[in-house]
Image (cartoon, rainbow, N blue to C red):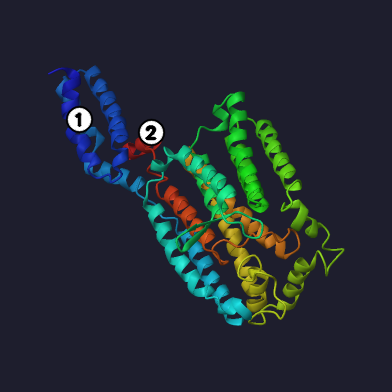
Amino acid sequence: MSKDNGNRSDFSQFLDSVCGHVRAKQLHPEIKDELTGHLEELVEEYIAEGKTEQEAIDAAISRMGEPHLIGRELDRTHRPRTDWVMLLLILLFTGIGLLAIYNVQTYASGSLGNSQLLERKIVFTVIGIAMMCALWAIDYQRIKKYSEYFFVAGLLLMAWVSQFAWQVNGQRTWLVVGSFSFYVPTVAIFAMIVGMAGIKPLKDRNWKESLLLIAYRGIVPIYLLMEMKTATMAAIYTVIFVVYLCLTSRFWWQAAAFAAGCVLFAGFMAINSPYGFVTRRALNFLNHWDDPRGSGYVINLSLDILRSAGWWGKGGLPKIIVPFPQSEGLLPNFIYAFGWAGGVIVIMLIVGFIGKIVITSIHLKDAYGKLLVAVLGSWFIIQFIWTVAMIFGYAPFVGISLPFISYGGTEQLIQFAAIGLMLGVYRRRNRIAASRDQSEEILAN
């Protein structure tokens, strides 16, 4: 028997015993390679000291320690992790959302009070949580190879709907399948974000490839969103794409140049669209201080409601409510009902959620997982910050609502799906690769 075959034969039982205690089977080949390297180094040391080959092999295996202890320690190091803080925040947001919608449905007049908002939100919540758990359980690395398909699917969905879907209030945004309807911009952006995270990063591309990426993954989606008359969603996607460029560029000035191009294109499209962000709500927002009962009516109404809420709230809804109290107008009406005590709790939870996303993305070691959490997290951060800013008069009311809290069918399902992916990344953050430093530390102890 040759030396190499002898080593492999004697090592295999030891390695199989170690890996038998490690539940992360995808790490077994790497663990075996790492341990084999240590064993072979020890064998060479013992042979140099004058031991025979078999004596050196036996001594090396003995020195490594008990295989079941090594295996259990490796399993502990790479066991699945649950992001309990994130999970708790989502559950709290969901509970607050159900309470807020119950308040709207109970005290709203007209058709809004008889619309079964609460019942529908409960259904969407249950379905959304099921989707979250399913994506949480899936190994997100398996999704990476389908990244291009996800992105193309998002583009094709927008292109088809913008031409052939029913037009409602000047927008072609809804896809009707049987008795279900889906808000396409939200679904498409989610698909494109997931696809974007898994492609070759900007820093690994030359200038021609970089320009193609900017055109294909930046300008084309923005154009399609504007064609659907959804300037707000185009603005959100622009910010997310800028975040992606900043995270994947080799140099800051490179990201700045490409980002400026996308922002300028989005601004040009907005100015030239009759349903654009600039030509409607944004101009009203800029003039709201000068025209409190005209263009600035909604923002000033929101500020009046907040001033009258008091610390413990007035209960119910104000006599004149902010429009769409179940969605973009939910937060000021919620603060009116439950007071600034409730409002401060919501804002603190939002700050905690944003901080948790930032901390998680910073500490992730897997490049794909880090980027996936960052771009999905930026989507949530934009919505949370914008929603809070607009009730204080620092941003226009443009149809953006609080994730998980406000009423919404498609939005709520996609939000739970996004959180499921983020929880899945966190769950496997120690199982993606068994680093040499971790292995050496375990063996040293």
Across and down, in percent, residue 197 comes to 51, 40
Disc 1 marks which amino acid? Phe
- N-terminal-most mark, 1 or 2: 1
Across and down, in percent, residue 419 comes to 48, 55
Across and down, in percent, residue 338 comes to 63, 77
SS at mark 2 in the image: helix
Q: How many marks?
A: 2
Numbered circle sitting on residue 436 = 2
Whether 150 is drawn above or below 185: the answer is above
Q: Name the residue nearer the viewer: 108 or 164.
A: 164
User: Which residue is painted at 43% across and 57% down in the image?
Assistant: 132
SS at mark 1 in the image: helix
Q: Is residue 33 left or right of residue 416?
A: left
The image quarter containing residue 303 is bottom right
Q: In this figure, which residue is indicated by the disc labeled 1?
A: 11
Disc 2 marks which amino acid? Arg
Q: Name the residue nearer the viewer: 20 or 339.
A: 339
Q: Is residue 122 left or right of residue 295?
A: left
